[in-house]
Amino acid sequence: MGDSTENLAVLLLISRIVILFRSQSSCTQELLTLEALAEQVLTEWQEIRKGDEQPSRELLWRIAQRICSRALYSAWRSSDVAKRNQAFYNLRRYLEQLLRNSRSFSEPGAHAVDDIIHQALEILLQEKNPGPNDPAAFLKWTQTILIRQVHVYQQKYQSDSCVSLDAQIELFQAQFVTNSSSSDIRDPLDQVVLHELQQALGRAILSMRNPRYQQVLIYTYLVGVDEDEMARRLNVPVQDIYLWRHRALKALRHDPEIMNILRSMLD
């Protein structure tokens, strides 16, 4: 009777840990069910259990994290495009969640979170950066990269208050995609600035040698197509779209005409 009660207590504790873990982390959404996670946590606990000892909450949490890390890494490196896409979405949400909940991170700029996550994902998506040897350490590895990018961004922000081109999409994409109605009252100067920016972007995009960069920027800025739809139209994983866009935006940041117009929009 005692063993049954102890086993039940362990199972209840594992269930609570698993539910809490999933509620606080979206890293394995659509990749690992709660039931499968609980079963694997129990299996791993039984493999390392010594005698009649009971698991601590901290130990079960670490086991759950390692299991989720392996599941995410497997999907991240999968040959199945749908799994890779889901892993990308999950990891992006996970990094954003970590950054926004971090007590040590004080946001130095309005778009700091977006910029830091873009830089971290750029590193994670590089083919020459396959990740840790142990898939169970994948989440810890991504956290390390994120922390490094926080420091890089904060140092850069202190030395150069730069404009985030990617983060300005929300400010002007609607004006590019949606035609003005007769009842839409705008500041004439804003219309002139937006028109200048549209023309400058068009010239810069057409001057790019990489056709993929051209496509993704045209879809993003001039057509208003999101990442999922772009991936479907071009028949590529969504990670490729994200990487191409991020690299194309880096190239645009070197265009003084575009950056000057963006700064004038923020003044």
Image: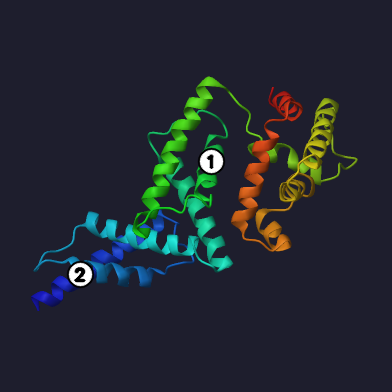
Question: Is residue 261 depicted above or below 14 in this figure?
Answer: above
- What is the CA distance from the residue labelled 1 to the residue labelled 2? 39 Å
The residue under the point 11% across, 75% down is 3
Query: Relative to 107, is 140 on the left or the right?
Result: left
Q: How many marks?
A: 2
Q: Please give the residue where the numbered disc 1 appears in the rendered image.
A: 119
Query: Do tag 1 and tag 2 residues touch (Cβ < 8 Å)?
Result: no
Q: Residue at x 79, y 49 (%)?
A: 223
Residue 17: x, y in percent? 30, 60
Numbered label attached to residue 47: 2
The image position of residue 182, as x and y in percent, is 91, 40
Within 10 Å of disc 2 (Cα), the crowding (few <14, some 14-19, many 20+) is few
Query: Amino acid under label 2?
Result: Glu
* SS assignment at label 2: helix
Lower position in the chain sequence, tag 1 or tag 2: 2
68, 193: nearer the viewer:
68
